[in-house]
Image (cartoon, rainbow, N blue to C red):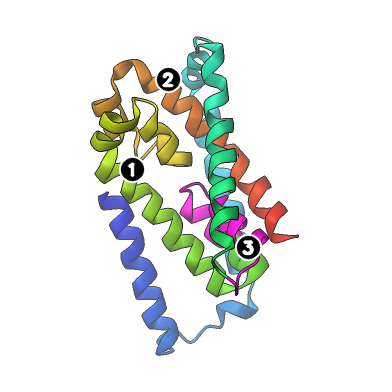
Amino acid sequence: MKGSLIIVGFFILGAICGVYHLIPYDFTQSKLSFYALCALMFSVGVSIGNDPQTLRNFRSLNPRLIFLPVMTILGTLAGCAVVSLFLSHRSVADCMAVGSGFGYYSLSSIFITEYKGPELGTIALLSNITREIITLLFAPLLVRWFGNLAPISAGGATTMDTTLPIITRYSGQSFVVVSIFHGFVVDFSVPFLVTLFCSI
C-alpha cells in the first residue's frame, strides 16, 4: 500500500512539473521512456532468475490451479471488452490494452504511453494502481464472499510481490505458491498482451 502511494505521489509530482514546465527537458521527444522500459524488463528478468526457489515451488502445484492465471487474464479482458461498450470515445482495443496491465502499472503504463500517448498511459497507470489498492484493502471481504482464490485473481500481476503478504494473511499459507505462480504467469503476459492490443 505504501509503495503504491509513493508511486502515485511521484506521478502527481511529475504531472505538476509537466504542466508548469518546471523541468527544462522535453520527454516527449526523447527515448528516455524506452530506456527506462528496457531497464525495467532487465530488472524483472534478474529478479525471477535470481530466485531458484520460485521454479522449484511451481513443480509442487496442483495441476488444476494452472488454469487460475488463464482465467484471470480471460476474465479481465472480457470485463474490459464489456466496459468499452459504455465508452464511445475509446475502442475495445484501447480498453483491453489498459486492462492487460493486470496491476503491473510501472510496465504497462510505459508501454501504452509509447504506443498510444500519455493520456491513455495515465489512464493505464491509475487503473492498474487502483487494482492493486482494491486487492490490498478488500482481500478479507473477497475471501469471505468469493473464496480463497478471489484475492489472488483480483491481484493480477501483483500477487508475486506487493499483494502477496495480504493474500497469505487472509487466504492462508497454503496459497503462497499458487499466488507466486499466478503472479509470475500474469506478469509474463503483460508486455505481450499490452503491445498486441496497442498495435490493433
Judging depth in this view, the residue of 52 and 157 nearest the camera is 157
Q: Circle 3 — which element?
A: helix
- Where does the image place residue 116, in percent across and percent down from the top left? 65, 69
In the image, which disc is placed on residue 94? 3
Asked if residue 75 lies in the magenta stretch, the reply is no
Residue 106 part of the magenta-drawn span: yes
Kindly indicate whether the residue at mark 2 contacts the one at mark 3 (C-beta within 8 angstroms).
Answer: no
Rendered residue at 67%/59% (across/down): 93
Give above or below for 83 relative to 59.
below
For this orientation, the residue located farthest to the bottom is 20
* Farthest residue, direction right: 200
Q: What type is the residue that disc 1 sits on? A: Thr
Residue 162 at x, y percent in the picture: 35, 40
Q: Secondary structure at mark 2?
A: helix
Relative to 108, 150 lies left or right: left
Q: Residues within 10 Å of mark 3 (few under 14, many from 20)?
A: many
**Residue 177: mark:** 2
141 vs 163, left or right, is left
At label 1, counting other C-alpha atoms closer than 10 Å, the crowd grade (few under 14, some 14-19, many 20 or more) is many
Disc on the earlier residue, 3 or 1: 3
Q: CA distance from mark 3 to mark 2?
A: 33 Å
Q: Which residues are magenta?
A: 88-111
The residue identified by callout 1 is 135
Q: Quadrant of the C terminus?
A: bottom right
Residue type at mark 2?
Answer: Val
Observer-nearest of 28 and 117: 117
Specify which label sits upstream in the sequence, 3 or 2: 3
| SS majority, magenta | helix
In the depicted structure, whether residue 195 falls above or below residue 167: below
3 vs 2, front mark: 3
| Residue at the image position 64 percent from the left and 66 percent from the top | 114
Q: Which amino acid type corresponds to the residue marked 3 in the rendered image?
A: Asp
